[in-house]
Amino acid sequence: MYSCDQLLQALKDSGCDQALSAVYAPGGAGLDQARGRAVHVTETFQKAFPGAGATALFSGPGRTELGGNHTDHQRGHVLCASVDMDMLACAAPNGLNVIRVHSEGYPDLTVNLEDLAPRKEDENTSAALVRGVAEAIAKRGFALGGFDACAVSSVLSGSGLSSSAAYEILIGNILNHFFCYGKLDAIELAKIGQYAENVHFGKLSGLMDQMGSSVGGAVAIDFGNPQDPAVQPINYDFARSGHALCIVDTGSDHSAKHLTEDYSDITREMRAVAAHFGKQLLREVPEADFRADLPALRRECGDRAVLRAIHYYEDDRRAVQEAEALKAGDFPRFLSLVNASGLSSALHLQNTWSTADPRQQAIPMVLAVGRELLGGAGAIRVHGGGFAGTVQAFVPQDKLEDFRAGMEALLGPGMCHVLRIRPQGGCVVVS
């Protein structure tokens, strides 16, 4: 157990290198950068909250969706993974009944634990996420206390890497460590994060984002039983695939407030199709019944809702097939399925641009140029929730530099990121 001063000294003396390497620098590469970042956030915490005791470092990683685009909120199948972009926080209990968070580049926030009810005025804010995570944990019977935290983030905001889920998992791990004796496992913390996003933040997301951030590594998830989703680790070494995983920042922010309704419309429209059959979710409706009733569904729900349901059934199947391809070591098959998913997202799901701002079509533009740069190799598709944000590409190593140069010629320097899938999900890095 470190005080803040002791933690800072241990970091500077390389006393925490083993713990940092396990999360950030397997094999030692990048350890200096990881150590410097940890020193920076701890020094920031020391200045903001002097005299703290029982200080620890926590990580909430971003996640990448590998398969199953918008299938999770219908209790379908997904394939996702945590990545090496994360939120890193230095935190300590404060003996008060408030949570205070200083996030670099953002306004400070304070949440009073005496009032954890959802607030309409806090929707779409970080305070809503903190309050929601705290409320969900308190409802599970834990006696919470306040803490202070300073956080830095390498997760691209509004990128489709789910910075909101990373933040929820970060806060959940801090509360779990200090006040819950570590009793909440990764799956329960994911459910807590989803509750915060749905009820407090106001976004009707499924559970994939939080699971991808919380569990770690590449995982196939079947959400058929939402209380006990089936989670299967996929032991595939992407580093040996001959391809780099690239996330291209299109320069359009998918966290923009007006896009929340676009995301929620997908859930609402899929549920409307399910309601035609007296069900709540498409997972409960046999695909044969859906296909047999297309004319009536078009009249009742509209073509867009029907097309989005078609996407659900097809991409739900693809997510399972993608996991099977990786387990079999068949990466070409996996790439073919990724490309098919991207085409379905564009044509059926229709989440590559928003009707609220039709002049902004950054994702279709990047997809068009990216396909030209790949020349039929690799795979490319919209990433995550869509409408704005990022594009995911699997790029052959011999095309990587040309691909990155082409993307940055279109979008600007630093807009094409090469990511590593990391084995750790949300965690206590040093305590």
Image (cartoon, rainbow, N blue to C red):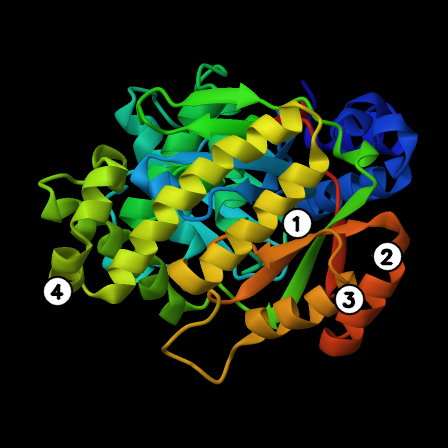
Q: Earlier in the sequence, mark 3 or mark 2?
A: 3
What amino acid is at disc 3? Answer: Leu
In this figure, which residue is indicated by the disc labeled 4? 299
What amino acid is at disc 2? Answer: Lys
In this figure, which residue is indicated by the disc labeled 3? 373
Q: Position of residue 426 (x, y in %)?
A: 58, 31
Whole-angstrom CA distance, mark 2 to mark 1, is 32 Å
Whole-angstrom CA distance, mark 2 to mark 4, is 47 Å
What amino acid is at disc 1? Answer: Val
Q: Is residue 183 left or right of residue 39?
A: left
In this figure, which residue is indicated by the disc labeled 1? 152
Q: Position of residue 183 (x, y in %)?
A: 45, 14
At x 52% / y 58%, what residue is drawn?
Answer: 343
Instruction: Locate the N terminus by quadrant.
Output: top right
Q: Earlier in the sequence, mark 1 or mark 3?
A: 1
What amino acid is at disc 4? Answer: Arg
Whole-angstrom CA distance, mark 4 to mark 1, is 50 Å
Identify the mark at residue 173; answer none if there is no mark.
none
Whole-angstrom CA distance, mark 3 to mark 2, is 8 Å
Q: Position of residue 391 (x, y in %)?
A: 62, 59
Q: Quadrant of residue 380?
A: bottom right
View extreme (bottom): residue: 359
